[in-house]
Image: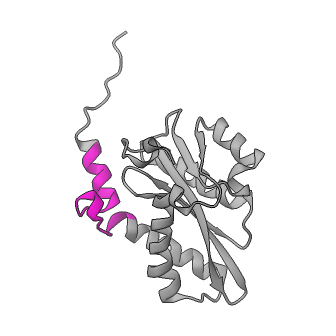
Amino acid sequence: MTSSITTSPPPYRIWVADFTYVSTWTGWAYVAFVFDAYSRAIVGWTTAATKTTSLVSKALNMAVWRRDHYGHPIEPGLIHHSDAGSQYTSVKFTESLAMQGLSASIGSVGDAYDNALAESIIGLFKTEVANRHGPFKTLTEVEFALMEWADWYNNARLHSRLGYLSPAEYEAAYYSQQSPRRPALV
């Protein structure tokens, strides 16, 4: 990952993404995430029984929808960083990024450090949810556990890197310091 990816730009300039798997009684459940590099917020997430392009696309679409819904639509040039997995390098996914005005950044093959932010937060999910509450009976149980954890993580989990604020508080502090945009005089 380049040094520009490892520094903290303002919110919604760099997203990092990855997915993991957790055990269920019926097989693996795959969990995809999109994180904001500035606030460490989980901006998109989803689960599925298969690890296809659709899995990572749904997490991306959720992230885009949530940003728009909360009044901070993404702007062209937002960087979407991921590993070099086939789901993220597929034509369908890269076209989706381009259609939404996002720039793809793909890490080097086989280098977990290249996507360290995503790996770190996924490690927390596995420790705090999957290892503590699994194996889950069904994919639906994984979905509910993920929703609860993402809400708690974004709104209550304190981060030393964020001055012991939650991702939501850290982001709110950023926006409270920004002057409101005023419409241009015609």
> Where 91 sits versus 54, above or below?
above
> Where 141 sits versus 68, above or below?
below
- Please name the residue shown 51% across and 39% down the image: 78
Residue 69 drawn at (x, y percent): 47, 47
> Where 110 sits versus 30, above or below?
above
Quarter where residue 183 is shown:
top left
**Magenta region: which residues?**
154-174
In the drawing, does residue 29 fall left or right of residue 129?
A: right
Residue extending furthest toward the top? 186
- Please name the residue shown 68% across and 90% down the image: 25
- Please name the residue shown 68% across and 52% down the image: 88
Quarter where residue 166 is shown:
bottom left
Residue 85 drawn at (x, y percent): 69, 57
Q: Quadrant of the C terminus?
A: top left
Residue 4 drawn at (x, y percent): 44, 41
Q: Nearer the viewer, residue 36 or 43?
A: 36
| Residue 168 sits inside the magenta stretch | yes
